[in-house]
Image (tube, rainbow, N blue to C red):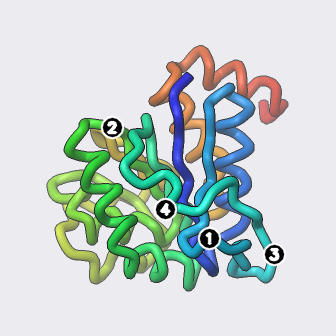
Amino acid sequence: MPRVLVPLAQGCEELEAVTVINILRRAGLEVLSASLDGRPVKGARGITLVADVPLDEVKGQDFAAVVLPGGQPGTDNLKKDPRVIDLLERQAARGALTAAVCAAPSVLAQAGLLRGKKATSFPGALDQAPHLGTLVDAPVVVDGKVITGRSAGMAMDFALEVVEQLLGKEKRDEVEGRLVRR
């Protein structure tokens, strides 16, 4: 089964982190959450999340996808961490999937992964982003091996798109059907 890494920075948006991890695990993906500093992560709303591993423990490992939750100051903490930028650059060089929601697409932009790509984000999060292709007003955007999501309100749709890109539409429909969203 494909492995997915979800880096968790202090100040991340808890709704995005937990929704992504939950939906991907429902699909049967092996998901590892990794704390940047090796400690429990205090989210943007004060909820404490306990990651599976410290980020250093998975350094150099390959993943089918790396998925970044947004939130502030979590997104800024992701951007400041050279290990995260290196991880994203390695993912792109291998042709593997990268995904980011809310403000976190700005981390993809900083790593150069949005150059020439269509992307969405929380309003204003990509206004000053370097290497940006085309900003799209949509809940979720897929452009090649890059998935971006607009906001915490789109976290479930974003996570389901990651499932579809990794495991196919049938698996997405199966997971979504069990959520009784329709």
Please state if 72 lies on the left or on the right of 13 as rendered. Answer: left
Q: Amino acid at mark 3?
A: Ile
Q: Indicate which label's residue lies in the foreground, 3 or 4.
A: 4
**Alpha carbon separation for disc pair 2 and 4:** 20 Å
Dot 4: few (<14), some (14–19), or many (≥20) neighbours within 10 Å? few
Q: Quick check: can you spot residue 47? A: yes
Residue at image x 51%, y 19%?
168
Chain-order first, disc 3 or disc 4: 3
Classify mark 3: helix, strand or loop.
Answer: loop
Q: Residue at label 4?
A: 56
Q: Are marks 1 and 4 in contact (CB under 8 Å)?
A: yes
- Residue 52 position within the rendered picture, expressed as x and y whole percent measured from the top left: 69, 54
Q: Residue furthest front?
A: 57
Q: Which residue is mark 3?
A: 47
- What residue does disc 1 label? 38
Q: Which mark is residue 96?
A: 2
Image quarter of the C terminus: top right
